[in-house]
Image (spheres, rainbow, N blue to C red):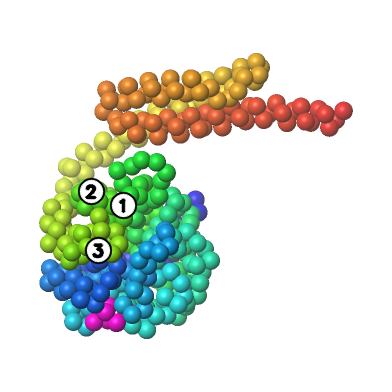
Amino acid sequence: MNGKNNNLDILPMKQWDMDLGERPIIIAGPCSAETEEQVLSTAHLLSGRGIKIFRAGIWKPRTRPNTFSGVGERGLPWLRRVKQETGMMTTTEVASARHVYEALKYGIDILWIGARTTANPFLMQEIADALQGVDLPVMIKNPINPDLDLWIGAIERIYNAGIRRIAAIHRGFSTYGQSIYRNEPNWQIALDLKAQLPNIMLINDPSHIAGRRDLLQSVAQKAMDLSFDGLMIEAHITPEQAWSDAHQQITPDQLMELLSNLQLRKAQAQDRLLEEELVKLRAQIDVFDSLLMEILSDRMNVVRRIGELKKRYNMTIFQEKRWQQIILRAQQVAGEKGFSSSFVEKLFKLIHQESIGQQTLIMNKERKAEHATKEKA
Protein backbone atom coordinates (compact mmCIF):
# COMPACT_ATOMS: atom_id res chain seq x y z
CA MET A 1 0.00 0.00 0.00
CA ASN A 2 2.70 2.47 -0.88
CA GLY A 3 0.95 4.08 -3.82
CA LYS A 4 -0.56 7.54 -3.68
CA ASN A 5 -3.92 6.37 -5.00
CA ASN A 6 -5.39 2.90 -4.69
CA ASN A 7 -7.92 3.64 -7.46
CA LEU A 8 -10.98 2.66 -5.44
CA ASP A 9 -13.96 4.47 -6.91
CA ILE A 10 -15.34 5.42 -3.51
CA LEU A 11 -18.14 7.93 -3.90
CA PRO A 12 -17.22 11.43 -2.73
CA MET A 13 -19.46 13.07 -0.15
CA LYS A 14 -21.44 15.09 -2.73
CA GLN A 15 -22.54 11.86 -4.44
CA TRP A 16 -23.82 10.05 -1.36
CA ASP A 17 -27.45 10.88 -2.24
CA MET A 18 -28.19 11.68 1.40
CA ASP A 19 -28.93 14.98 3.09
CA LEU A 20 -25.81 15.07 5.25
CA GLY A 21 -25.81 18.85 5.61
CA GLU A 22 -23.00 21.28 4.96
CA ARG A 23 -19.40 20.80 6.08
CA PRO A 24 -18.71 20.02 8.80
CA ILE A 25 -21.05 17.04 8.83
CA ILE A 26 -21.99 16.44 12.45
CA ILE A 27 -22.75 13.00 13.87
CA ALA A 28 -23.82 13.21 17.51
CA GLY A 29 -25.41 11.17 20.24
CA PRO A 30 -24.53 9.22 23.37
CA CYS A 31 -21.65 6.81 23.65
CA SER A 32 -24.16 4.12 24.58
CA ALA A 33 -27.89 3.68 24.24
CA GLU A 34 -28.83 3.19 27.88
CA THR A 35 -32.59 3.56 28.11
CA GLU A 36 -35.32 4.38 25.64
CA GLU A 37 -36.00 7.66 27.43
CA GLN A 38 -32.33 8.68 27.37
CA VAL A 39 -32.03 7.88 23.64
CA LEU A 40 -35.21 9.69 22.58
CA SER A 41 -34.65 12.73 24.82
CA THR A 42 -31.11 13.19 23.51
CA ALA A 43 -32.23 12.71 19.92
CA HIS A 44 -35.04 15.27 20.15
CA LEU A 45 -32.68 17.85 21.68
CA LEU A 46 -30.08 17.27 18.96
CA SER A 47 -32.66 17.27 16.16
CA GLY A 48 -34.04 20.56 17.45
CA ARG A 49 -30.56 22.03 17.07
CA GLY A 50 -30.18 20.92 13.46
CA ILE A 51 -28.17 17.72 13.87
CA LYS A 52 -29.04 15.28 11.08
CA ILE A 53 -27.24 12.07 12.09
CA PHE A 54 -27.79 10.40 15.47
CA ARG A 55 -25.22 7.96 16.86
CA ALA A 56 -25.56 5.54 19.76
CA GLY A 57 -23.67 2.39 20.65
CA ILE A 58 -25.90 -0.68 20.94
CA TRP A 59 -23.11 -3.20 21.36
CA LYS A 60 -20.08 -1.90 23.27
CA PRO A 61 -16.69 -3.63 23.01
CA ARG A 62 -15.17 -3.12 26.46
CA THR A 63 -11.60 -3.67 27.59
CA ARG A 64 -12.56 -5.40 30.84
CA PRO A 65 -15.29 -7.97 31.52
CA ASN A 66 -18.14 -7.27 33.92
CA THR A 67 -18.54 -3.71 32.62
CA PHE A 68 -21.51 -2.30 30.73
CA SER A 69 -21.31 -3.77 27.22
CA GLY A 70 -24.39 -2.18 25.70
CA VAL A 71 -28.08 -3.03 25.82
CA GLY A 72 -27.87 -5.14 22.66
CA GLU A 73 -30.71 -5.78 20.23
CA ARG A 74 -33.39 -4.41 22.56
CA GLY A 75 -31.99 -0.91 21.89
CA LEU A 76 -32.48 -1.10 18.13
CA PRO A 77 -36.23 -0.28 18.29
CA TRP A 78 -35.24 2.88 20.17
CA LEU A 79 -33.13 3.99 17.21
CA ARG A 80 -36.00 3.20 14.88
CA ARG A 81 -38.21 5.48 16.97
CA VAL A 82 -35.55 8.22 16.74
CA LYS A 83 -35.79 8.02 12.96
CA GLN A 84 -39.59 7.97 12.98
CA GLU A 85 -40.03 10.84 15.45
CA THR A 86 -37.23 13.19 14.40
CA GLY A 87 -36.40 12.30 10.81
CA MET A 88 -32.74 11.95 11.79
CA MET A 89 -30.56 9.31 10.19
CA THR A 90 -29.23 6.74 12.64
CA THR A 91 -25.86 5.02 12.96
CA THR A 92 -24.46 2.40 15.30
CA GLU A 93 -21.35 0.24 15.61
CA VAL A 94 -21.28 -3.32 14.30
CA ALA A 95 -18.59 -5.85 15.16
CA SER A 96 -19.94 -9.10 13.69
CA ALA A 97 -22.16 -10.45 10.94
CA ARG A 98 -24.97 -10.88 13.47
CA HIS A 99 -24.74 -7.20 14.39
CA VAL A 100 -25.04 -6.31 10.70
CA TYR A 101 -28.15 -8.44 10.20
CA GLU A 102 -29.84 -7.03 13.31
CA ALA A 103 -29.01 -3.42 12.42
CA LEU A 104 -30.36 -3.85 8.90
CA LYS A 105 -33.53 -5.45 10.25
CA TYR A 106 -34.28 -2.24 12.19
CA GLY A 107 -33.45 0.15 9.35
CA ILE A 108 -30.19 1.64 10.66
CA ASP A 109 -29.09 4.11 7.97
CA ILE A 110 -25.31 4.07 8.42
CA LEU A 111 -23.07 1.46 10.02
CA TRP A 112 -19.74 2.14 11.64
CA ILE A 113 -16.95 -0.29 12.43
CA GLY A 114 -14.89 0.31 15.56
CA ALA A 115 -11.14 0.43 16.06
CA ARG A 116 -10.86 -3.02 17.63
CA THR A 117 -12.76 -4.61 14.76
CA THR A 118 -10.80 -2.74 12.08
CA ALA A 119 -7.65 -4.30 13.53
CA ASN A 120 -9.01 -7.84 13.01
CA PRO A 121 -9.04 -8.98 9.34
CA PHE A 122 -11.15 -12.04 10.21
CA LEU A 123 -13.93 -9.92 11.69
CA MET A 124 -13.66 -7.41 8.87
CA GLN A 125 -14.13 -10.15 6.29
CA GLU A 126 -17.09 -11.55 8.23
CA ILE A 127 -18.74 -8.12 8.21
CA ALA A 128 -17.90 -7.61 4.53
CA ASP A 129 -19.50 -10.95 3.66
CA ALA A 130 -22.64 -9.93 5.58
CA LEU A 131 -22.79 -6.68 3.57
CA GLN A 132 -22.71 -8.36 0.15
CA GLY A 133 -25.60 -6.98 -1.91
CA VAL A 134 -26.40 -4.26 0.63
CA ASP A 135 -26.37 -0.60 -0.41
CA LEU A 136 -25.78 1.61 2.61
CA PRO A 137 -22.91 3.78 3.88
CA VAL A 138 -20.24 2.31 6.13
CA MET A 139 -17.82 4.32 8.28
CA ILE A 140 -14.57 2.64 9.31
CA LYS A 141 -12.57 3.79 12.31
CA ASN A 142 -8.80 3.61 12.27
CA PRO A 143 -7.31 0.51 13.96
CA ILE A 144 -6.15 0.82 17.55
CA ASN A 145 -2.48 0.84 16.55
CA PRO A 146 -1.01 3.32 14.04
CA ASP A 147 -1.08 1.02 11.01
CA LEU A 148 -2.15 2.68 7.77
CA ASP A 149 -2.10 -0.54 5.75
CA LEU A 150 -4.45 -2.21 8.22
CA TRP A 151 -6.86 0.72 7.93
CA ILE A 152 -6.78 0.64 4.15
CA GLY A 153 -7.15 -3.15 4.19
CA ALA A 154 -10.35 -2.84 6.21
CA ILE A 155 -11.66 -0.25 3.74
CA GLU A 156 -10.80 -2.51 0.81
CA ARG A 157 -12.72 -5.43 2.33
CA ILE A 158 -15.85 -3.30 2.63
CA TYR A 159 -15.29 -1.91 -0.87
CA ASN A 160 -14.95 -5.44 -2.28
CA ALA A 161 -18.36 -6.23 -0.78
CA GLY A 162 -19.84 -3.68 -3.19
CA ILE A 163 -20.10 -0.73 -0.79
CA ARG A 164 -19.19 2.57 -2.46
CA ARG A 165 -20.32 5.07 0.19
CA ILE A 166 -17.42 4.67 2.61
CA ALA A 167 -16.14 7.11 5.21
CA ALA A 168 -13.07 6.89 7.43
CA ILE A 169 -13.28 7.91 11.09
CA HIS A 170 -10.08 9.12 12.70
CA ARG A 171 -10.36 8.39 16.44
CA GLY A 172 -6.69 8.41 17.40
CA PHE A 173 -4.30 5.60 18.30
CA SER A 174 -3.44 3.80 21.52
CA THR A 175 -0.04 4.57 22.94
CA TYR A 176 1.92 3.36 25.93
CA GLY A 177 2.98 6.11 28.26
CA GLN A 178 1.76 9.48 29.42
CA SER A 179 -0.27 11.74 27.14
CA ILE A 180 -2.88 14.43 27.56
CA TYR A 181 -5.02 12.48 25.09
CA ARG A 182 -6.91 9.26 25.57
CA ASN A 183 -5.70 8.28 22.10
CA GLU A 184 -2.84 10.04 20.31
CA PRO A 185 -4.13 11.86 17.20
CA ASN A 186 -1.18 11.03 14.92
CA TRP A 187 -2.80 13.35 12.38
CA GLN A 188 -0.36 12.46 9.62
CA ILE A 189 -1.75 8.93 9.34
CA ALA A 190 -5.22 10.28 8.58
CA LEU A 191 -3.75 12.70 6.04
CA ASP A 192 -1.79 9.84 4.44
CA LEU A 193 -5.04 7.87 4.15
CA LYS A 194 -6.66 10.83 2.39
CA ALA A 195 -3.69 11.11 0.05
CA GLN A 196 -4.11 7.46 -0.97
CA LEU A 197 -7.93 7.58 -1.11
CA PRO A 198 -8.74 11.14 -2.22
CA ASN A 199 -12.52 10.65 -2.49
CA ILE A 200 -13.05 9.15 0.94
CA MET A 201 -15.01 11.21 3.46
CA LEU A 202 -12.81 11.86 6.50
CA ILE A 203 -14.58 12.21 9.86
CA ASN A 204 -12.80 13.13 13.09
CA ASP A 205 -13.84 11.70 16.46
CA PRO A 206 -12.67 14.28 19.03
CA SER A 207 -14.40 12.40 21.86
CA HIS A 208 -12.19 9.32 21.64
CA ILE A 209 -9.03 11.29 20.93
CA ALA A 210 -9.54 13.69 23.82
CA GLY A 211 -11.17 11.47 26.42
CA ARG A 212 -11.93 14.73 28.27
CA ARG A 213 -14.48 17.47 27.66
CA ASP A 214 -11.95 20.27 28.05
CA LEU A 215 -9.90 19.05 25.06
CA LEU A 216 -12.78 18.56 22.62
CA GLN A 217 -12.74 22.10 21.23
CA SER A 218 -9.04 22.13 20.36
CA VAL A 219 -9.15 18.68 18.75
CA ALA A 220 -12.23 19.56 16.70
CA GLN A 221 -10.63 22.81 15.55
CA LYS A 222 -7.47 20.99 14.50
CA ALA A 223 -9.58 18.60 12.41
CA MET A 224 -11.27 21.51 10.68
CA ASP A 225 -7.92 23.19 10.03
CA LEU A 226 -6.78 19.95 8.36
CA SER A 227 -9.86 19.92 6.06
CA PHE A 228 -11.71 17.02 7.66
CA ASP A 229 -15.24 16.66 6.31
CA GLY A 230 -17.00 16.21 9.62
CA LEU A 231 -17.04 15.38 13.32
CA MET A 232 -18.48 12.54 15.38
CA ILE A 233 -19.03 13.83 18.92
CA GLU A 234 -20.61 12.07 21.87
CA ALA A 235 -23.54 14.01 23.36
CA HIS A 236 -25.71 12.93 26.28
CA ILE A 237 -28.55 14.60 28.18
CA THR A 238 -26.73 13.99 31.50
CA PRO A 239 -23.08 13.21 30.68
CA GLU A 240 -21.97 12.87 34.30
CA GLN A 241 -24.42 9.99 34.74
CA ALA A 242 -23.48 8.17 31.52
CA TRP A 243 -22.97 4.42 31.81
CA SER A 244 -19.82 4.57 29.67
CA ASP A 245 -17.19 7.22 28.81
CA ALA A 246 -18.79 9.86 31.01
CA HIS A 247 -15.72 12.12 31.00
CA GLN A 248 -15.75 12.70 27.24
CA GLN A 249 -19.45 13.33 26.65
CA ILE A 250 -21.14 16.73 26.54
CA THR A 251 -24.72 18.00 26.58
CA PRO A 252 -26.49 19.04 23.35
CA ASP A 253 -26.15 22.69 24.43
CA GLN A 254 -22.40 22.27 25.00
CA LEU A 255 -22.16 20.64 21.59
CA MET A 256 -23.78 23.67 19.94
CA GLU A 257 -21.40 25.98 21.81
CA LEU A 258 -18.44 23.94 20.57
CA LEU A 259 -19.70 24.07 16.98
CA SER A 260 -20.39 27.81 17.14
CA ASN A 261 -16.79 28.40 18.27
CA LEU A 262 -15.27 26.50 15.34
CA GLN A 263 -13.43 28.57 12.77
CA LEU A 264 -14.06 27.16 9.30
CA ARG A 265 -11.35 28.07 6.84
CA LYS A 266 -11.25 27.70 3.07
CA ALA A 267 -9.35 24.78 1.56
CA GLN A 268 -8.21 26.83 -1.43
CA ALA A 269 -7.12 30.44 -1.86
CA GLN A 270 -9.78 32.55 -3.57
CA ASP A 271 -7.58 35.59 -4.20
CA ARG A 272 -5.05 35.63 -7.09
CA LEU A 273 -2.46 37.67 -5.20
CA LEU A 274 -2.76 35.37 -2.18
CA GLU A 275 -2.29 32.33 -4.41
CA GLU A 276 0.82 33.87 -5.99
CA GLU A 277 2.29 34.58 -2.55
CA LEU A 278 1.58 31.00 -1.45
CA VAL A 279 3.32 29.68 -4.56
CA LYS A 280 6.43 31.75 -3.73
CA LEU A 281 6.51 30.64 -0.11
CA ARG A 282 6.00 26.99 -1.04
CA ALA A 283 8.86 27.26 -3.50
CA GLN A 284 11.04 28.38 -0.59
CA ILE A 285 9.91 25.36 1.42
CA ASP A 286 10.87 23.09 -1.49
CA VAL A 287 14.36 24.59 -1.43
CA PHE A 288 14.68 24.08 2.32
CA ASP A 289 13.44 20.50 1.99
CA SER A 290 16.18 19.81 -0.56
CA LEU A 291 18.75 21.34 1.78
CA LEU A 292 17.45 19.19 4.64
CA MET A 293 17.96 16.05 2.56
CA GLU A 294 21.48 17.13 1.66
CA ILE A 295 22.30 17.79 5.32
CA LEU A 296 20.85 14.42 6.36
CA SER A 297 22.87 12.72 3.64
CA ASP A 298 26.08 14.39 4.89
CA ARG A 299 25.20 13.40 8.45
CA MET A 300 24.69 9.76 7.45
CA ASN A 301 28.07 9.77 5.70
CA VAL A 302 29.65 10.70 9.04
CA VAL A 303 27.51 8.07 10.78
CA ARG A 304 28.88 5.40 8.44
CA ARG A 305 32.45 6.51 9.11
CA ILE A 306 31.75 6.19 12.85
CA GLY A 307 30.33 2.74 12.15
CA GLU A 308 33.56 1.70 10.44
CA LEU A 309 35.54 2.81 13.50
CA LYS A 310 33.20 0.91 15.85
CA LYS A 311 33.62 -2.19 13.73
CA ARG A 312 37.41 -1.85 13.67
CA TYR A 313 37.67 -1.47 17.45
CA ASN A 314 34.88 -3.95 18.26
CA MET A 315 32.51 -1.40 19.85
CA THR A 316 28.74 -1.69 20.26
CA ILE A 317 26.58 0.30 17.85
CA PHE A 318 24.41 1.88 20.54
CA GLN A 319 26.24 4.28 22.84
CA GLU A 320 23.76 5.33 25.52
CA LYS A 321 25.78 8.23 26.93
CA ARG A 322 26.25 9.76 23.47
CA TRP A 323 22.55 9.33 22.67
CA GLN A 324 21.52 11.13 25.86
CA GLN A 325 23.88 13.99 24.98
CA ILE A 326 22.27 14.36 21.55
CA ILE A 327 18.73 14.44 22.96
CA LEU A 328 19.66 16.87 25.74
CA ARG A 329 21.34 19.30 23.36
CA ALA A 330 18.46 19.08 20.88
CA GLN A 331 15.88 19.83 23.57
CA GLN A 332 17.90 22.79 24.81
CA VAL A 333 17.97 24.27 21.31
CA ALA A 334 14.31 23.41 20.66
CA GLY A 335 12.92 26.28 22.72
CA GLU A 336 15.30 28.78 21.17
CA LYS A 337 14.12 27.79 17.68
CA GLY A 338 10.43 27.74 18.56
CA PHE A 339 10.03 23.95 18.43
CA SER A 340 8.26 21.77 20.99
CA SER A 341 10.44 19.32 22.91
CA SER A 342 8.23 16.42 21.82
CA PHE A 343 8.73 17.26 18.14
CA VAL A 344 12.50 17.46 18.49
CA GLU A 345 12.65 14.21 20.44
CA LYS A 346 10.56 12.37 17.82
CA LEU A 347 12.69 13.82 15.01
CA PHE A 348 15.99 12.80 16.54
CA LYS A 349 14.67 9.36 17.46
CA LEU A 350 13.90 8.78 13.78
CA ILE A 351 17.34 10.05 12.77
CA HIS A 352 18.95 7.87 15.45
CA GLN A 353 16.96 4.85 14.27
CA GLU A 354 18.25 5.34 10.72
CA SER A 355 21.79 5.87 12.04
CA ILE A 356 21.66 2.56 13.90
CA GLY A 357 20.34 0.91 10.75
CA GLN A 358 23.22 2.30 8.68
CA GLN A 359 25.83 1.11 11.20
CA THR A 360 24.14 -2.30 11.48
CA LEU A 361 24.58 -2.73 7.73
CA ILE A 362 28.29 -2.07 8.15
CA MET A 363 28.57 -4.64 10.95
CA ASN A 364 26.58 -7.23 8.99
CA LYS A 365 28.70 -6.63 5.91
CA GLU A 366 31.76 -7.82 7.83
CA ARG A 367 29.93 -10.90 9.14
CA LYS A 368 28.75 -11.83 5.65
CA ALA A 369 32.30 -11.50 4.33
CA GLU A 370 33.63 -13.72 7.15
CA HIS A 371 30.88 -16.28 6.45
CA ALA A 372 31.70 -16.33 2.73
CA THR A 373 35.41 -16.84 3.49
CA LYS A 374 34.67 -19.78 5.79
CA GLU A 375 32.45 -21.41 3.13
CA LYS A 376 35.21 -21.14 0.53
CA ALA A 377 37.70 -22.66 2.96
Numbered tag placed on residue 209 in the rendering: 1
Foreground mark, 2 or 3? 3
Pointer 3 or 1: first along the chain: 1
Image quarter of the C terminus? top right
- Asked whether, in this view, residue 260 is left or right of residue 1, the answer is left
The span shown in magenta is 76-81
Residue 34 or residue 336, whichever sits in front: 34
C-alpha separation, residue under disc 3 versus residue under disc 1? 18 Å
Tell me if label 2 and label 1 are in contact, CB under 8 Å.
yes
Which residue has dot 2 on it? Answer: 215
Which residue has dot 3 on it? Answer: 242
C-alpha separation, residue under disc 2 versus residue under disc 1? 9 Å
Q: Is residue 160 above or below residue 196?
A: below
Residue 126 seen in the current view? yes
- Asked whether, in this view, residue 359 is left or right of residue 321, the answer is right
Q: Overall secondary structure of the magenta stretch?
A: helix
* Residue 50 within the magenta-colored segment of the rendering: no
Pointer 2 or 3: first along the chain: 2
Numbered tag placed on residue 172 in the rendering: none
Pointer 2 or 1: first along the chain: 1
Residue 110 or residue 62, whichever sits in front: 62
Q: Secondary structure at mark 1?
A: helix
Q: Position of residue 184 (x, y in %)?
A: 35, 47
